[in-house]
Image (cartoon, rainbow, N blue to C red):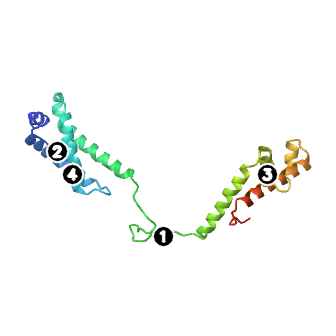
Amino acid sequence: MDYNIFLLAKNGNKDAIELVIKTVEPFIFKQCRKMKLREYDYDDLRQICYMAVIKGIPKINEEHLSTAPSYLMKCVHNALKYEARRALSKPEDASIETEDKDGIKYAEKLVSNEETEKIFFRNHGKTKIKEAFEILCTEEKNIVSFYINDPYGGIKRYSELYHADYRKSRYLKDKALKRMKNFLESSNDDDIEF
């Protein structure tokens, strides 16, 4: 191809720009046939490629006119990759009522032995218990943790480890559990089952 056409196209000659596009057009067709994007059809992809070529023509360096066709092909390739990244960055909208490729609704594929309400209330109860645990001081948290891990020997282990009186440790455990119980009762959540 004559390098003067690239110079004319760079200077804004419309006929030269059309001729440059025609030289790159087989590559554009090939790349657009390969690409399958959600929201784009073949013509949309072709338009993106034409825009990439038109934007790339003014950037052609006069000293590198011999590599101008490969530069324009790279522009086309990069434009398609950019559009693919944009399309893939947006998740596809889906609902539980949409169908998969076999025509089966996603709702029909969900299988669970538990009811959603029971799961919600169980998790809701756990979060309330965690909130009640957070109101305790550090010493109370320690003793409750020992008691939860070992209900039959945890208090004794706690009193030996921290060199505390066993009866005081037991009293502290009862006091901490009572504070947690009062917090849970005051939160007005009657749906927590213990």
CA distance separating discs 4 and 2: 12 Å
Total marks in image: 4
Q: Nearer the viewer, residue 148 or 139?
A: 139
Q: Secondary structure at mark 4?
A: helix
**Image location of residue 169, percent across then percent down:** 87, 48
CA distance separating discs 3 and 4: 68 Å
- Among numbered discs 1 and 4, the one appearing first in the sequence: 4
**Amino acid beneath label 4:** Arg
Above or below, comparing residue 161 to residue 130 in the picture:
above
Residue bearing the label numbered 1: 107
**Are dots 4 and 2 in contact, CB under 8 Å?**
no
**Are dots 3 and 4 in contact, CB under 8 Å?**
no
**Amino acid beneath label 3:** Val
Residue bearing the label numbered 2: 24
Residue bearing the label numbered 3: 144
Q: Which mark is residue 46?
A: 4
**Image location of residue 105, percent across then percent down:** 44, 70
**Amino acid beneath label 2:** Val
Residue at point 51%, 68% (across, down): 110
- Disc number lying in front (3 or 4): 3
**Amino acid beneath label 1:** Ala
Q: Which mark is residue 28?
A: none
**Image location of residue 131, percent across then percent down:** 69, 53
**Are dots 3 and 2 in contact, CB under 8 Å?**
no
- Disc number lying in front (3 or 2): 3
